[in-house]
Amino acid sequence: MCKAFSSLLTRVLLTICSRTLVQKEFPAGYATFISKNGIKHHVFDMKGTKKEKIPIKTMKSILRLVLDRQNHPLLMHCNHGRVRT
């Protein structure tokens, strides 16, 4: 198991929410890991926010997910965790 995956288990993570500019494949074993541990992963495809505003429909979807306490604890990150939005 990837070292990064196993560190998530110590935090009892329920939901991962990520934003991506480009569809990329997840690392080997990722789908098995999240399924086995009951983690939900939501991906929001959207352009960078420095040049374009987030569409209202997308923002509502993100807020609905984040504000629902059943999804907590929640990890939210951007494209590979590098972009700051």
Image (cartoon, rainbow, N blue to C red):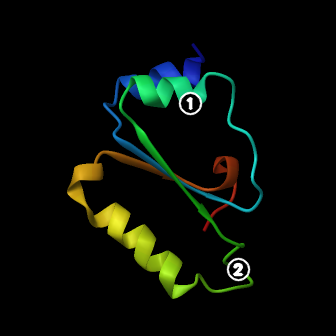
Measured as percent of width and height from the top left, residue 4 is found at 56, 25
- Residue 33 position, x and y percent, is 50, 24
* Circle 1 SS class: helix
Where is 18 relative to 55, above or below?
A: above
Categorize mark 2 by other alpha carbons within 10 Å: few (<14), some (14-19), many (20+).
few
Kindly identify the amino acid type of the residue bearing the numbered disc 2. Lys
The residue type indicated by label 1 comes to: Ala
- Looking at the image, residue 79 lies above or below residue 49: above
Q: Nearer the viewer, mark 1 or mark 2?
A: 1
Residue at 56% x, 30% y is: 31
Residue at 35% x, 23% y: name it. Answer: 10
Q: CA distance from mark 1 to mark 2?
A: 31 Å
Query: For the C terminus, which image quadrant?
Result: bottom right
Q: Which one is earlier in the sequence, the residue at label 1 or at label 2? A: 1
What's the residue at 70%, 85% (across, down)? 52
Q: Which quarter of the figure has residue 3?
A: top right
Reply above or below: 31 against 67. above
Q: Which residue appears at 37% of the width and 71% of the height? A: 63
Look at mark 1 in the image and give the residue it sits on: 31
Residue 55 placement (x, y as % from top left) = 57, 84
Q: Are marks 1 and 2 in contact (CB under 8 Å)?
A: no
User: Furthest-left residue in view?
Assistant: 69
Could you say whether the residue bearing mark 2 is in a helix, strand or loop? loop
Q: Is residue 36 left or right of 80 when viewed as pictured?
A: left
Instruction: State which quarter of the image contains the N terminus.
Output: top right
The answer to which of 11 and 28 lies nearer the viewer is: 28
Residue 9 lies in quadrant = top left
- Label 1 crowding class (10 Å Cα cut-off): few <14, some 14-19, many 20+? few
